[in-house]
Amino acid sequence: MVFRNGLSYTGRRMIRLLLVAICFSDAASTVFAKAPTVSAQLVGTVMEGRHSWNLYDLHNEMLPDSSGNFIRTLSLSATGGRNRDGIYAMRFFTGHDLRSVYKRSRISGQLVSGRESAFADNIIFQVPEDGIYQVLFNPALGTYSITPHTDELTTINSLQVNGFVHDTEDAIECFDGNRTRPAEKWDEWVPAHEFTRKGDGSWTITLPLSVKGGHEKNGVYQCLFSANHNSDWGYSAILGKPGRLAGGNGYDSRVGHIEESAVVFRVTSDSNYTITVWPDTFRFTISPTVEYYRAIKFQVNGDVVMDPWNPKSPDHQMVKEKDGIWSKKLQLSPTGGSLGNGLYTMNFSIDGDWALDSIGFGGLWGKTWHSAPQEWNLLFRVERADEYLVTLDPVKGTFAIEPPVKPMTRIESLQISGDFEIYGKEGWNPVDPGHDMVTLDGHRYAKDLVLARGVTYSYKYTANRAGWSWSLVDYPYDGYRRLAPHGNPPALQFTSPRNGLYRFTADTESGDYSVNLIQLR
């Protein structure tokens, strides 16, 4: 039996054995380790499913050989990739460690790791035809190869700015007949997003910005830069280093480091602002002067504190210890939490502003994930009333809770809530037992509901009977028709063409979802 991307049952079993011996390496420079590497991960659009960029996902493991190489066999297409043009993006990790990332060097076949990896791009390549391709990665040598031959892309022919800097543009995801496109604000193909190339190697664009503009109408703007209309050939900011860019960071493909965020800034007056980018040196400027965040404070949010989702609340503030670890003491109880059953929801914020995106859970307990949209809140249960100490290490990207709690790390059940007549007044009660979906394999779920002709229904999926702590909705900014758990996006909608029994389906691995008529009424 062969799984997606050519991973056999035997290979999958080897991967499970590898996970038992995870090694968290500390790559502090572009010097590649000589000791044997325990595990390696391949992420990017070459992979499939919701977690294609997540190093913690089992499906992204590579298989070792006896020569120190790691190998992954992939089925790729000339009409595949984000833009359906055969162009793919990828990078490597080792030891399931966010700091041990490997990106493209300026020399083909060579990789950059450690601190310098921030100033490197994803590997971008185009396949000439449909076929089976083998990716080989050698972390000790810092090399990679793809066979048969593919065309690696390194020349920037255009540059775009995407995000909430486009105040007048639409915020609804759409389908253009070829692929799902992100909301207009985040669509890298919108002509108004194009930079102009200058003779000195820089690119510029001038935009009207306002103290009453931005995502929350408060003068705070968030954006990312993309090259060649490919957001995975992207650039984000480095917190605390105004004017510096990190490479390989698109809306979906952000590395997950706490220190790498979208380009976020505040304007202090209404004006035309010119953004200038030097992609070759990973730098940018904005003129007139704007205010940047510096990541000097961290907060705890959720039902572990009062005023749960207000990161500006003083009660949320963490304390910085001498070793650089941030901490917060919390009084928690088996009868606490928003549901009163000891189940708590938590995440972290930076400088008290959601514009810098939350810090949450990416799939491995104790490791943070700072990368929308496939980022969960931290969900856990306490079994005794006590004072719990929450710690956050923003450099290593780790967190801990002491005394130990019972973490919830995977989807074990799925519910669907919405304004369905059959639900009555409990339509939007996500913990109502009647909202449970059924599953045969643990990741594909279904529920049959009677719908009326001509009615537009709104609905959302939630997981583990945990209320809105883990909700899954199609995110409007990522450009994919698939479920995502980040934030609180608008509900899904479906207009029933006729009276009948309809089957709602959701796949928690791939993110696929659908509504199909199964019986007329």
Image (spheres, rainbow, N blue to C red):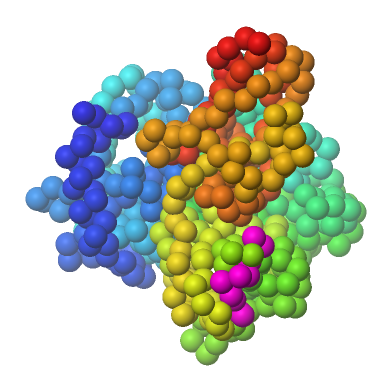
| Tally of numbered tags | 0
Q: Nearer the viewer, residue 314 or 52?
A: 314
In this orientation, does residue 118 appear? no
Q: Position of residue 448 (x, y in %)?
A: 57, 25
Residue placed at 63% from the left, 70% from the top?
A: 336
In reply to whether residue 443 is colored magenta, the answer given is: no
Residue placed at 50% from the left, 59% from the top?
A: 361
Q: Nearer the viewer, residue 448 or 249?
A: 448
Residue placed at 77% from the left, 49% from the top?
A: 215
The residue most toward the left is 66
Q: Quadrant of the N terminus?
A: top left
Horizontal side of residue 64 vs 181, given as left or right: left
Horizontal side of residue 116 vs 293, given as left or right: left
Q: Nearer the viewer, residue 498 or 128?
A: 498
Q: Position of residue 90 (x, y in %)?
A: 39, 42
Residue placed at 56% from the left, 71% from the top?
A: 334
Q: Quadrant of the C terminus?
A: top right
The residue most toward the bottom is 322
Tell me which secondary structure the magenta stretch mostly adopts.
loop
Q: Give the image quarter of residue 330.
A: bottom right
Q: Position of residue 131 (x, y in %)?
A: 28, 22
The vertical placement of 238 against 270, above or below, is below
In reply to whether residue 336 is colored magenta, the answer given is: yes
Q: Nearer the viewer, residue 23 or 340?
A: 340
In this orientation, does residue 108 appear? yes
Horizontal side of residue 440 vs 249, given as left or right: left
Q: Give the image quarter of residue 140.
A: bottom left
Q: Position of residue 395 (x, y in %)?
A: 48, 72
Question: What range is drawn magenta here?
Answer: 330-339
